[in-house]
Image: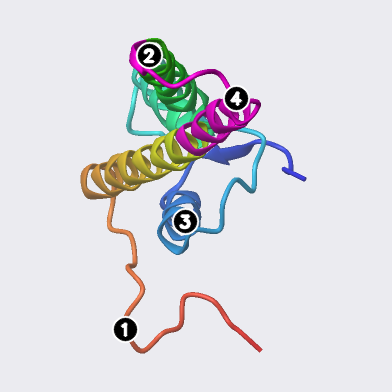
Amino acid sequence: MAREALRIDSAEKLTLLQRDVHTGLGRRYRSVTFALPDLSERENSTIQKRINRLYLACGCGEATILGFAALIAYGVWFLTRTQPFTWWDPVWAFAAFFAATTVGKLAGLWRAHLRLKAEVSDLVDRHGEIEKPTEEEPLCAVN
């Protein structure tokens, strides 16, 4: 379950967000709020909206688009074929829909994660010296 909102008001908190994003720990906070002292309230608000849109992305839009595209493609194929209707036809339609929505969901999540990594890296580059993990330092401990 996601904890309370993460408030980014220092380089250390930005480092925490960067490590979470780069290690793929997933959504650990309900939302991310920005209050960086070197930015105006409007700039903090703009950054907060962009980061939260990517941080809370679920991939549902891409899943919906691919799912309906699969159903339309299956419907066109079904209407143009010369074979008679069988009871397997709805099963294949559901399988095509399920596969397409799964691929869409995963693609949407992956795209949002890559964009979030780029956005956080850009923030780190612009707003302070943030310690980057070294190759000797493990990003997460596995027992």
Magenta: main secondary structure equals helix
Marks 4 and 3, how far apart in space?
A: 62 Å
> Callout 4: helix, strand or loop?
loop
Q: Are marks 2 and 1 in contact (CB under 8 Å)?
A: no
Give the residues in magenta. Answer: 80-100
* Numbered badge on residue 91: none
Left or right of 125 in this view: 116: right
Point out which mark residue 12 bears.
3
Q: CA distance from mark 3 to mark 1?
A: 20 Å
The quarter holding residue 66 reads top left
Instruction: State how far apart marks 2 and 3 are (Cα).
Output: 22 Å
Residue to which mark 2 is pinned = 42
Nearest-to-viewer mark from 2 and 1: 1
Measured as percent of width and height from the top left, residue 45 is found at 43, 18
Q: Which residue is mark 1?
A: 135
Which of the two discs, 2 and 3, labels the residue nearer the N terminus?
Answer: 3
Kind of residue sitting beneath label 3 = Glu
Q: Under tag 1, what secondary structure?
A: loop
Q: Nearer the viewer, mark 1 or mark 4?
A: 4
Residue at the image point whose x is 60% and y is 45% from the top: 27
Q: Earlier in the sequence, mark 2 or mark 1?
A: 2
Q: Residue beneath label 4, please? A: 86
- Amino acid type at circle 2 is Arg
Q: Amino acid at mark 1?
A: Glu
Dot 2 or dot 4: first in sequence order is 2
Q: Are marks 4 and 3 in contact (CB under 8 Å)?
A: no
Q: Residue at x 36, y 13 (%)?
A: 76
